[in-house]
Image (cartoon, rainbow, N blue to C red):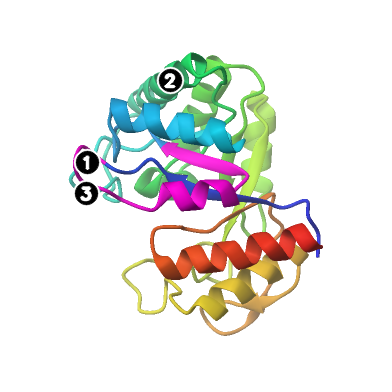
């Protein structure tokens, strides 16, 4: 098994007295922590505490910007102009980076969240807006995008702007034949069986084939693997996968 693939997890998604996820137990297991920036979840104190947790465990910190949609957890599509998207992404990266700098570190990559993440898969104009936001914030700041069966489109647009890409795959999501995620509204789009999640994660980390949404085998090439850590079952999978990667 290759150890080159990194493990990432969406974190810092609590808000006020409402708690989301088990960051304290997941953080020691991941290489990259995608931290909410206040638009779909989180608040200033949560951001500050989660940055400190990431620093304590040596996790690389990524900004996890979203559409301004706290009620919908950033999963509702919004009609925003490219200028708005660029500005809201810059705003959120800057907010998180303020806490990072206060803790002696910086934002090291950007991973859009939810509906914004999905919109970038099919909208060149919005993808360019986010790429430009990354470039304007700091030259060389990578953007994390969905690893598909063919990422030529994303690579060409990123190279034109001069932004590095990180390709991300998911252990607990079902994939369509073209490598896009199966819509959450479809039954079976999210895996809940720990053994299936672990099996898919290990297959992706090795570059091996795994069953897609239609049952046919497919392969993905990824730089980072997202494993959610918001319940006991996924934490158990994350622990087992971390052990398997470390032992390889």
Which mark, by number, is residue 226?
none
Task: State the separation of the CA atoms marked 3 and 1.
Answer: 6 Å
Which residue corresponds to the image point at 61% horizontal and 25% vertical from the top-left? 141
Which residue corresponds to the image point at 65% horizontal and 38% vertical from the top-left? 165
Q: Are marks 3 and 2 in contact (CB under 8 Å)?
A: no
Q: Quadrant of the C terminus?
A: bottom right
Task: State the separation of the CA atoms marked 3 and 2.
Answer: 25 Å
- Where is residue 240 drawn, in percent x and y? 62, 67
Q: Is residue 146 visible?
A: no
Frontmost residue, 11 versus 158: 11
Frontmost residue, 78 versus 99: 99
Q: Are marks 3 and 1 in contact (CB under 8 Å)?
A: yes
Residues packed near mark 2 inside 10 Å, few (<14), some (14 to 19) or many (20 plus): many
Q: Which residues are magenta?
A: 15-35
- Residue holding disc 1: 70
120 sits left or right of 244 in the view? left
Q: Earlier in the sequence, mark 3 or mark 2?
A: 3
Mark 2 residue element: helix
Residue 183 quadrant:
bottom left
Residues packed near mark 3 inside 10 Å, few (<14), some (14 to 19) or many (20 plus): few
Instruction: Choose mark 3 or mark 2, whichever is in front.
Output: 2
- Where is residue 225 drawn, in percent x and y? 61, 55
Q: Earlier in the sequence, mark 2 or mark 1?
A: 1
- Residue holding disc 3: 72
112 sits left or right of 151 in the view? left
- Residue holding disc 2: 99
52 sits left or right of 162 in the view? left
- Residue 29 inside the magenta-drawn segment: yes
Q: Is residue 32 visible?
A: yes
């Amino acid at each position: 098994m290759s150890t080159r693939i990194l493990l990432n997890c969406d974190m810092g998604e609590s808000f006020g007295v409402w708690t989301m996820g088990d960051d304290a137990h997941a953080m020691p297991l991941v290489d990259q922590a995608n931290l909410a920036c206040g638009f779909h979840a989180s608040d200033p104190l949560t951001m500050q505490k989660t940055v400190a947790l990431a620093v304590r465990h040596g996790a690389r910190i990524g900004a996890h910007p979203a559409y301004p949609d706290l009620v919908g957890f950033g999963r509702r599509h919004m009609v925003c102009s490219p200028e708005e998207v660029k500005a809201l992404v810059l705003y959120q990266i800057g907010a998180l980076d303020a806490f990072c700098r206060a803790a002696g570190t910086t934002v090291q990559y950007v991973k859009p969240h939810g509906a914004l993440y999905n919109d970038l898969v099919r909208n060149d104009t919005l993808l360019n807006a986010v790429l430009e936001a990354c470039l304007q914030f700091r030259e060389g700041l990578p953007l994390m995008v969905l690893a598909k069966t063919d990422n030529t489109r994303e690579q060409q647009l990123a190279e034109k702007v001069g932004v590095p890409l990180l390709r991300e795959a998911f252990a607990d999501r079902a994939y369509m034949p073209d490598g896009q995620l199966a819509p959450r509204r479809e039954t079976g789009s999210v895996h809940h069986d720990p053994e299936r999640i672990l099996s898919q994660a290990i297959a992706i980390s090795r570059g091996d084939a795994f069953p897609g949404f239609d049952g046919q085998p497919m392969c993905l090439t990824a730089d980072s693997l997202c494993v959610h850590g918001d319940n006991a079952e996924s934490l158990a999978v994350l622990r087992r996968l971390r052990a398997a990667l470390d032992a390889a």
